[in-house]
Amino acid sequence: MDLWYSENHTEYVKLSIKVDKHLHSVQSDFQRIDIFESQEFGRFLTLDGIMMLTEKDEFAYHEMLVHVPMALNQKIQTVLIIGAGDGGIVRELAKYPTISKMDLVEIDPDVVKVCVEYLPQTASALNDSRLNIHYMDGLKFVRGKSSVYDLIIVDSTDPFGPGEGLFTKEFYGNCYNALNDNGICVNQLGSPFYTADANAMTRAFSKLRATFPIATAYQAHVPTYPSGYWLFGYGSKNIQPVSENLADLSKIGIKTRYYNADLHRGCFALPTYVQEMLDAK
């Protein structure tokens, strides 16, 4: 009998992946965590039945959250990562010897435990000596902090359940306060394609734009996410998202599979329908 993982992207559209093995399942205090193995996408992680990452396409998502801000400010040393218990963000950040401190705030310790065991491709740098892991609510962790970080990366789940607090005006205000004068905040916004996803995306972006004087969105192709088309938010106090002074990552020994300087400049050029959505809020 064939085993398939299926996720509804809308009432009328779903993604299905043929599964070779169901490797692990656990109900944590916060959510159900599953690891599957497939021929096409390798191992993949779902939380409460929703796709979080696959070994085949996770590099696009993680590289775009990390290397876009890192290329804009070569003086980034302190980084706050909220969510991202799979380790993919930390893996990309760990490539930079200039980073002195990474605080990873993950609400669910079981996510980290499962990913270390079953997803070594993403979790490979979770033992980095510069990393401090805090198991708590990201909203509570960032509250009250002032001018502590150069970069904040919000790798949250969807805006409900454990990740709901990471899409509030209070949260973005706390992130603003926690950043120094040249600080950058990036976050995943979701897809603008299907109606429900687009509504969640515009709500999240409106809060980012209301908080940061420089705020925009950029895009990437992540095949296993709804519609395969994904947006990220960019907010900063002083640094514009596109600059002629982008770091040449290859010259400093940073290897990437998705990100490059030409892509950086182009990813902020959004389709008309997406720009209209963002401007309407």
Image (cartoon, rainbow, N blue to C red):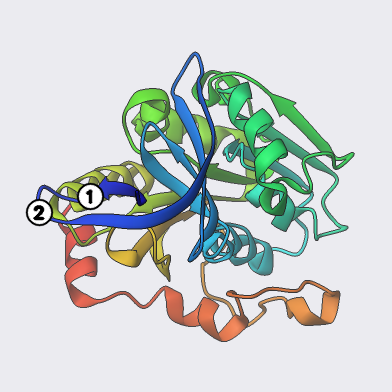
Point out the residue furthest to the top here. 29
95 lies above or below 179: below
Residue under the image location 80 percent in, 60 percent down: 95
Disc number placed over residue 275 in the picture, else none: none
Q: CA distance from mark 1 to mark 2?
A: 14 Å
Q: In the picture provided, is 201 more to the left or to the right than 43? A: left
Residue under the image location 45 percent in, 82 percent down: 266
Q: Which residue is mark 1?
A: 197
Q: In the picture provided, is 271 more to the left or to the right than 100? A: left
Residue under the image location 66 percent in, 46 percent down: 119
65 lies above or below 268: above
Disc number placed over residue 12 in the picture, else none: 2
Q: In the picture provided, is 276 more to the left or to the right than 214? A: left
Which mark is first along the chain, 2 or 1?
Answer: 2
214 lies above or below 27: below
221 or 41: nearer the eye?
41
Q: Amino acid at mark 2?
A: Tyr
Q: Is residue 214 visible?
A: no
Q: In the picture provided, is 156 more to the left or to the right than 147? A: left
Q: Is residue 66 visible?
A: yes
| Residue 148 point in image, percent of width and height | 70, 34
Q: Secondary structure at mark 1?
A: helix
| Residue 139 point in image, percent of width and height | 50, 24
| Residue 69 point in image, percent of width and height | 61, 61
Are there few (<14), some (14-19), or many (20+) residues within 10 Å of tag 2?
A: few
Q: Amino acid at mark 1?
A: Asp
242 or 61: nearer the eye?
61
Pair 1/2: label in front: 2
Are there few (<14), some (14-19), or many (20+) residues within 10 Å of tag 1?
A: some
160 or 122: nearer the eye?
122
